[in-house]
Image (cartoon, rainbow, N blue to C red):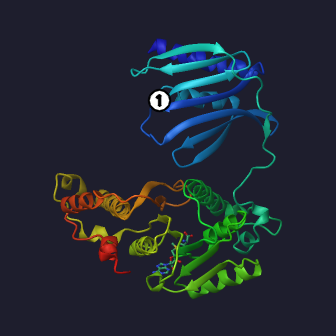
Amino acid sequence: MEHTNEIAGQFLQRLQQSISDGRFVRLTLSKSGGQDKSFKNVYARLIELKGEAALSFTLRYATRDEVKNHPVGEGIAMVGLWLGQDFLNGTLFTLDEDISIQYSKKRRPKLFSSPASQEAPPPMAHDKHKQYFVEPDSAPYLQAMGITSAGGQVLGSGQRKFRQINKYIEIIDGLLKQQPLPENPHIVDMGSGKGYLTFALYTHLAKQPGLNPAVTGIELRQNLVDFCNGLAQQSGYSGLSFHAQDIHDFHPERIDMLIALHACDIATDIAIAKGIQAGAGIIIVAPCCHKQIRQQMHCQTDMQAILRHGILEERQAELITDGIRALLMESKGYRTKVFEFISTEHTAKNLMIVGLKGKEDGAALTKVEAIKRDYGIEYHYLERLLEGDQGV
Ligand SMILES: C[S@@+](CC[C@H](N)C(=O)[O-])C[C@H]1O[C@@H](n2cnc3c(N)ncnc32)[C@H](O)[C@@H]1O
């Protein structure tokens, strides 16, 4: 153990020395070793923050990047925490040499040195202007929604919503790189509410050269639909419109991307079914409450010993509801990803299910049957909607 700490300490010392000598170029951590296998890499570079040098980390997860800046000392301590736990390899690039630390399966580290592969560090970035997917001063609807001031500054009370909007657009932007939309796509947002995310998505897509998107928000509440249509008109967003109706009664000819964020209980299932039946290339849902399966669940396995606790049964019901949703989507030819949409700092409803059209998984329905049997579930609402594809 002492030896392990000593080697890691030497690596961190070299990192510190290279920064204080102005010889640091960049640092990469790789080879995930922790429990969270979606945490893939960390990339560090030096920036200037409020006149001081700081380490800027890009934390790469399977579906998203997070950027975190730390004062140098704190940043080096972060590297120390990640190394040997979350990451088994680290490479420090300096102007003099490349230094690697590699952990064995038994988590014993070794240091390696090779001639410098980098000639010069990238110019130090400054924190003058952070790049957002949705720029606060170029999106007039944000002001009408109470997120920004007349001068285009994000208001204190709008910070959370602003971060949520940006995260959401960042995720969609990443998905569209994997599964691009066709030209003139029709995107439907089911249960669009006050329209924050619908507006952000429209303006983001409308910026893409030649895409020419049409975005439709479907929302039960007439007052919200009137507000959103008024704002879309005022803003000159000709491709954005909202309709006051139940998503159940909405039968579009074409949907290229289906979105339903925080639509209550079975409204998420109706939305998924609509997307599947319209052959949408991309389906994105963030489920909300999960009553339908909870009410039916009577566990038939030893898990009952755990599920006798109400809170655990509730969590399991959510897991099964969303897990079966993903399997049913797979049975209909979608590759699925289930991941955390935003941190619980913003909202507790933070799970996202994404389906990208691909190949059918013939075994998915058998898996659904086995799970239903184990948990004494008669039916999943989405299953009923999809049965025979007779239309929702
Ligand atoms: C929790 S809000 C989410 C709003 C928005 N998607 C967001 O994430 O900010 C859910 C919205 O879905 C609407 N809704 C629920 N069931 C619906 C249905 N069957 N048809 C249309 N809208 C529905 C509600 O009126 C509500 O505005």
Question: Is residue 282 visible to the viewer in this orientation of the structure?
Answer: yes
Provide the residue designation for mark 1. Answer: 85
- Of residues 273 and 72, the one nearer the viewer is 273
Q: Is residue 138 left or right of residue 91?
A: right
The quadrant of the picture occupied by the C terminus is: bottom left
- Of residues 346 and 382, the one nearer the viewer is 382
Image position, residue 132 (x, y; %) = 71, 55
Q: Residue at x 57, y 30 (%)?
A: 29
Amino acid type at image mark 1 = Gln
- Of residues 63 and 205, the one nearer the viewer is 205
Residue 154 image-quadrant placement: bottom right
Question: Is residue 49 visible to the viewer in this orientation of the structure?
Answer: no
Direction top: furthest residue: 3
Q: Residue at x 66, y 21 (%)?
A: 15
Image position, residue 279 (x, y; %) = 46, 70
Residue 49 image-quadrant placement: top right
- Does any atom of ligand 1 lie closer than 8 Å to the CB of label 1? no
- Of residues 8 and 110, the one nearer the viewer is 110
Image position, residue 384 (x, y; %) = 30, 75
Query: Does residue 366 sit above or below 234 in this rendering?
Result: above
The quadrant of the picture occupied by the N terminus is: top left
Characterize the local packing of mark 1: few (<14), some (14-19) or many (20 or more) Cα atoms within 10 angstroms.
some
Image position, residue 295 (x, y; %) = 27, 71
Q: Residue at x 63, y 34 (%)?
A: 43
Q: Residue at x 63, y 75 (%)?
A: 214
Say which element carries label 1.
loop
